[in-house]
Image (tube, helix red, strand yellow):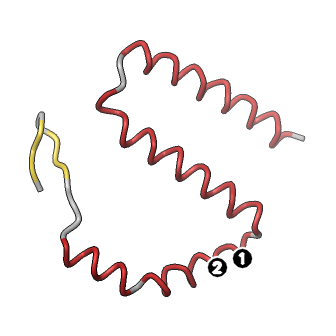
Amino acid sequence: MRGEERRKTYRITREGRTYLRGRRREIEERFRAFETAVGPERAALFRELRATGKLLALALRDVTPVQARALRKLIVKLRERMMAVLAD
């Protein structure tokens, strides 16, 4: 852990990566069980939402105020369109 600009950041250790590699099969099996429970379309939706969240989280520190406003507008529009789809 190291602090930058009064924010805590964490990095996975070599041991942590090794642990996750050793459990890859278990993680994949759990995701397959999740996909079976919710269906492939919903699982794909979850993956896309997760990937989008990761993208924003990784880029957040470098986002300019102009970019932040533009991204917020996109997200508001997307949420509105999602509500319309869910209302059908």
**In what element is the residue under mark 1?**
helix
Earlier sequence position, callout 2 versus callout 1: 2
| Image coordinates for residue 84, horizontal then vertical, percent | 81, 33
**In what element is the residue under mark 2?**
helix
Query: The disc labelled 2 sits on which kind of residue?
Result: Arg
| Image coordinates for residue 81, horizontal then vertical, percent | 75, 31
| Badge 2: residue crowd in 10 Å (few <14, some 14–19, many ≥20) | some
Tell me how far mark 2 sits from mark 1, CA to CA: 9 Å
| Residue at x 61%, y 25% (from the top left corner) | 76
Do residues under tags 2 and 1 come within 8 Å of each other at their CB atoms? no
Q: Is residue 84 left or right of residue 70?
A: right
Q: Foreground: 88 or 70?
A: 70
| Residue at x 47%, y 16% (from the top left corner) | 69
Give the residue number, with chain letter if any, for mark 2.
Answer: 32
When the figure is inspected, residue 50 is found, relative to residue 24, above or below; the finding is above
Residue sitting farthest toward the top: 66
| Badge 1: residue crowd in 10 Å (few <14, some 14–19, many ≥20) | few
Which one is in front in this view, the residue at disc 2 or the one at disc 1?
Answer: 2
Query: The disc labelled 1 sits on which kind of residue?
Result: Ala
Q: Is residue 43 left or right of residue 15?
A: right
- Dividing the picture into quarters, in which one does residue 75 lie? top right
| Residue at x 36%, y 80% (from the top left corner) | 21
| Image coordinates for residue 12, horizontal then vertical, percent | 23, 65
When the figure is inspected, residue 29 is found, relative to residue 71, above or below; the finding is below
Q: Is residue 84 left or right of residue 45?
A: right
Give the residue number, with chain letter if any, for mark 1.
Answer: 37
Q: Residue 23, labelled with which disc?
A: none
